[in-house]
Image (cartoon, rainbow, N blue to C red):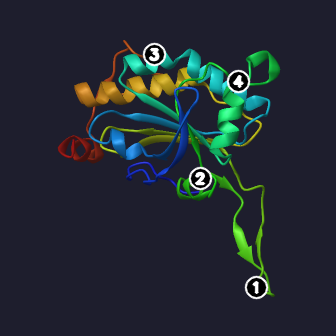
Amino acid sequence: MSVLVGKKAPSFKAAAVVNGGQIVSDYSLDQFVGKKPVLFFFYPMDFTFVCPTELFAFQDKLAEFEARGVEVVACSTDTEQSHWGWLQMDKNEGGIKGVTYPLVADTSKTISANFGVLAGDYEIDEEENMYANGPMIAFRGLFLIDKNGVVQHQIVNNFPLGRNVDEALRMVDALQHFEENGEVCPANWSKGDDAMKGTHESVAEYLSNN
């Protein structure tokens, strides 16, 4: 696992399904650099049980992310065709029809690897045969990337542990409060609460670069 906080988010171009059904071949988060922050999250697999609850939970809160100017993007190691098929199935049939934010297809597994959330790795045995030492799918990683393309927050959950979308929104609020007011947010801070004047050197460094 790698810690990307404070670093530029890894760049990529990959196929994705956007607007619930349109396949594009060269989707990239680079299009948002300098324009808006991104909430980029990974999930293990299409056509599973926990993953739809998360995908729908983000969809249910999508308007709140958009009101904050944040782009929500999901990614798994499935193909774009798998994403597309899943998006055409109704919820009561196990599908995710109605999800409108982009689903990136990390079929090469390089995006998951570069973000440090790939479960497994390729190795070479004594006979120089390549094999996978794990399932080669993504853990439940989540990355809040600011408008300059820098990761400001990340969490990584194991497969059985779904995420809290309200907490993701809280982190967006905390980042935006800091960016707008120069105040740092203490434990359990929520939008509208009192914050604290920042004194750490990293605060000054962040402000000088933004």
Q: On the image, numbered disc 4 is attached to which residue?
A: 53
Name the N-terminal-most of marks 2 and 1: 2
Name the N-terminal-most of marks 4 and 1: 4
Q: On the image, numbered disc 3 is attached to which residue?
A: 64
* Left or right for 43, reference 204: right
- Give the spatial CA distance, label 2 vs label 1: 24 Å
Please identify, in this view, whether the residue under mark 1 or under mark 3 is nearer the observer: 1
Q: Amino acid at mark 1?
A: Glu
- Give the spatial CA distance, label 4 vs label 1: 41 Å
Residue 128's tag is 1
Name the N-terminal-most of marks 1 and 3: 3
Indicate the secondary structure of the residue bearing disc 2.
helix
Indicate the secondary structure of the residue bearing disc 1.
loop
Indicate the secondary structure of the residue bearing disc 4.
helix
Q: Residue 2: x and y, percent?
A: 54, 57
Residue 102's tag is none
* Left or right for 36, reference 113: left
Residues packed near mark 3 inside 10 Å, few (<14), some (14 to 19) or many (20 plus): few
> What residue lies at 40% left-to-right and 15% top-to-bottom?
191
* Left or right for 54, reference 207: right
Indicate the secondary structure of the residue bearing disc 3.
helix
In front: 167, or 134?
134
Q: Amino acid at mark 3?
A: Glu
